Image (spheres, rainbow, N blue to C red):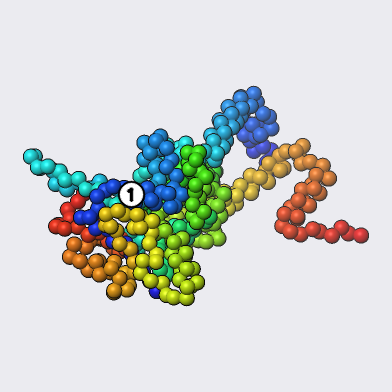
Amino acid sequence: MARWGMLIDLDRCTACQACVVACQVENNVSPGGADQAELGRAISWMRLVPFQEGGHEHGTRPDLRLVPLPCMHCEKPPCTKVCPVKATQIDHEGLVAQVYPRCIGCRYCTTACPYTVRHFNWKRPEWPQPMEQGLSPDVSVRPKGVVEKCSFCHHRLQQAKDKARAENRPLREGDYQPACVETCPAEAMVFGDLDDPRSSVSRLSESPRAFRLLEELGTKPKVIYLSKGAWGGEV
Amino acid sequence: MEKSDTDQDARLFAPMERTGRLFWIFAAVLLSIWLWGIYAWSTQLRRGLSVTGLNVPVYWGLYITNFVFFIGISHAGTLISAILRLAHAEWRRPITRAAEVITVLVLFFGLGCVLLDLGRPDRALNVLLHGNFTSPLLWDVASISTYLTGSTIYLYLPLIPDIAILRDRMPGRRGSTSRWRLAGRARQSSTGFWRRRSR
């Protein structure tokens, strides 16, 4: 069984935010509006989070880095443990899924997630007029009052599996790619099966540049970052 | 019951026999506050939790604070009542009774605060259908429902003699035979049994 993982090369990333836009279009994420964004309620499954390196001592220049932050799809996710209704679960392929029709909106998982990648629908999602007609039919629109998050474009996995079955062949590397990975113009993102030793994502995860975010918490994230030098970033 | 006792208690029963003007003024004020709350809640249901001012990362706010506060008040009620009863402080019976009433009522306020805080209160019973026992929230549900049941019984049992006194005291309020029969039938149907009429 596959164990899907993502790799983001921060040395290649240009912080162009194409992944953010691709994700919003692919997954029917409502932009929400400026007033909601000001309250910190903007929903974005993929975000660029600023990390500051250095600049704390007088006379040194701070180095600001923008780090793409999707759901880490942890192998030991804190969010699934605290959900009172099992509305979020980790499936047999390692994807942390969210069941929108079951979620009661208690926001325990958003509180538990150390990466703050879970988003609550504070109001009914809405789009500017022409965009409302261009929503993706593959992804359900979430009602107000439930929590949503990055799914690693789970619908694309289903489509890839259907296609492979129709062509009577096993799933090949590259068949299943989330929208952000497919979009990345700098080719900074790689996606694939971490259990397959020949896949580029598992080969790159062995790199000395590889690290995971907040590794010390024991969540075992399946999003791996590559960066040269010591990683001393702070939010 | 002795006659002298009844005379002494007459003043205690007075508020139950008559309803003064002040009562209706209070009732009207409280009712208007209640209606205002219902309107505010309907606004929240229509427009989502965006009206609460909660945001990221302040996912939990006043509702959960109130919940914890009311649970604390409720525990205080049990504590006061239990200590006074264990110490046989009979002369403090009114305080004991008030503490027991607070225990039960305030638990309902706490429960209400949690329901208000949910994004989808219509799905609250999913907690029973799909309960996840690794979630501390489910243990909240389990402990509070147990505590609510226990404290309701704890309130009701000592009330039984007082209810009996009221029954003897107010013969005028007993109602006609037909009303009693209706009440009996309602009780039976609510337990799922209809008594067959005798031929």
Residue A118 % position (x, y): 39, 51
Judging depth in this view, the residue of A187 and B9 nearest the camera is A187
What is the x, y in percent for residue A61?
12, 42
**Circle 1 Cα neighbour tier, 10 Å, few/some/many (<14 / 14–19 / ≥20):** some
- Looking at the image, the residue that sits furthest to the right is B199
Circle 1 chain: A
Secondary structure beneath label 1: helix
Tell me which residue sits at (35%, 44%) in the image.
B57
Q: Is residue B34 left or right of residue A163?
A: right
Residue B132 location (% of width, % of height): 47, 62
> A153 or B23: which is nearer to us?
A153
Q: Nearer the viewer, residue B138 or B199?
A: B138
**Toward the viewer: A234 or B1?**
A234
Q: Is residue B75 above or below residue A178?
A: above
Give residue A164's quadrant in the image. Answer: bottom left
Would you place residue A183 above or below residue B34 in this image? below
- Give the image quarter of residue A174: bottom left
Say left or right for B70 vs B199.
left
Residue lying at 40% horizontally and 34% vertically, measured from the top left: A35
Image-based side of A64 in relation to B146, left or right: left
What's the residue at 32%, 73% (across, down)? Answer: A196
